[in-house]
Image (spheres, grey):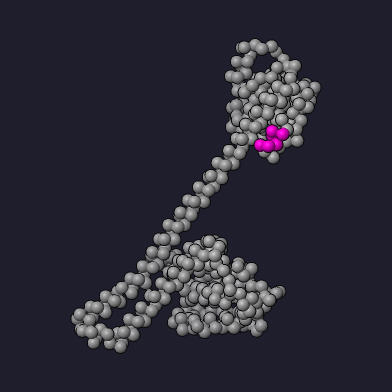
Amino acid sequence: MACHVKEISHLKLKCLIVDELQENRLALQSLLHDEHVEVIHARSVLEALDTLLQHDFALALIDVQMPGMDGFELAEIMRSTDRTRGIPLIFVTAAGNEAQRIFQGYEKGAVDFLQQPLSGQIVISKVKVFLELHTQRMLLEQKLQKIKETESYLQKALKTRDEFLSICSHELKTPLTSLKMQIQITNRLKEKKGAEVAFSEENMDKFLLQADRSVERIIHLVNDMLDISRVASGRLSLNLEKIDLGKLTADVIERLQSFMEIVNSPVKTEIKSDVTGLWDRFRLEQVLTNLLTNAAKYAPESEVDVHVYKLEGMGILKVTDHGKGISEEDQKRIFERFERAVSSHSVSGLGLGLYISREIIKLHHGIISVESVLGQGTTFTVRLPLI
């Protein structure tokens, strides 16, 4: 029996022996001795019921004739509860091969009978069959569980895909609609007042400004979609070079200065020198740009503080706004896909910026975190390993 059970499973299966006589229990145990089978004894029905509550058994060998409640009554109780209903029962009896008694045993839920005196070969053969069946059932349950988990994962993936497509279509529609409206306005102006007025320098400047903003927004959305695809497929890579985090931060702030002035969010900096590491310039600019524009979007008309310094072998970048803050519940989810700190009606975008930023920082073996108090503002902290 040992080799067959071992081939099927490495699990140690438990077998319950219920008999008032110790010599009978020991005799059965000696036959079932196997490194993959754990035998547990019970001397009575009450002791067996207590044991059944503590262990999960693959098989029970029950003596029919016991004082008080007999083996048939134990079987009836076991078949009445969900926990023990599925345990195969083999009755052990010293009585002769009485048809009525055997019928009664099967009626109570027995799967087989063993007659005393016991034959070692018969005991091993029968027990082996039920232990193997139990193991196969366990393996089948594991496979079914994996199938359920896979099904759940696929359903979540489909939900995420549908949500992604819905958000993308909505966000792309806005700048495209704006661009189309500008073209229609220019065409109507041309029809009513002629090309000279429609294409005047003033009108063209307005048209080109609006068109540039719409195209810029579309490019930003497309880049986010490409990045999320790269993250999902594990193809988001880094081009590492020696970077001064302070200088990079100053360059990004200078580039965004006009935007920050428009939303009345002046940037105050405190940048330490020589915060240097092997990082990807483009990707860190992407993270910093996202943090600064988020600060401007979620906390307009408030100052943004940016700090860069070294601490315990790490380069630290902190971006702090003085807006409404983020609740503890929202702080737990803002780094996930399609999540925002406020409703999608308040702020546009795919809700991917912080998720992509987190993945970029993780690729750098760094950490990005958030601290916020409602009514007092929010601080995002990036920690990157120095050279």
Side of 180 relative to 94 (left or right) = left
Stretch of the chain drawn in magenta: 3-8
Answer above or below: position of 247 versus 223: below
Q: Residue at x 39, y 68 (%)?
A: 172
Residue 111 visible in the shown view: yes
Estimate the x, y position of residue 381 in percent, counting from the top left. 60, 72
Q: Residue at x 74, y 19 (%)?
A: 118
Estimate the x, y position of residue 192 in percent, counting from the top left. 19, 81
Estimate the x, y position of residue 292 in percent, counting from the top left. 52, 76
Answer above or below: position of 202 versus 322: below
Residue closer to the observer: 352 or 232: 232
Image quadrant in which you'd find residue 210: bottom left
Question: Looking at the rendering, in which quadrant would you find the C terminus?
Answer: bottom right
Answer above or below: position of 46 versus 235: above
Side of 218 relative to 75 (left or right) = left
Residue closer to the observer: 250 or 36: 36
Image quadrant in which you'd find residue 366: bottom right
Is residue 321 shown in magenta?
no
Is residue 7 shown in magenta?
yes
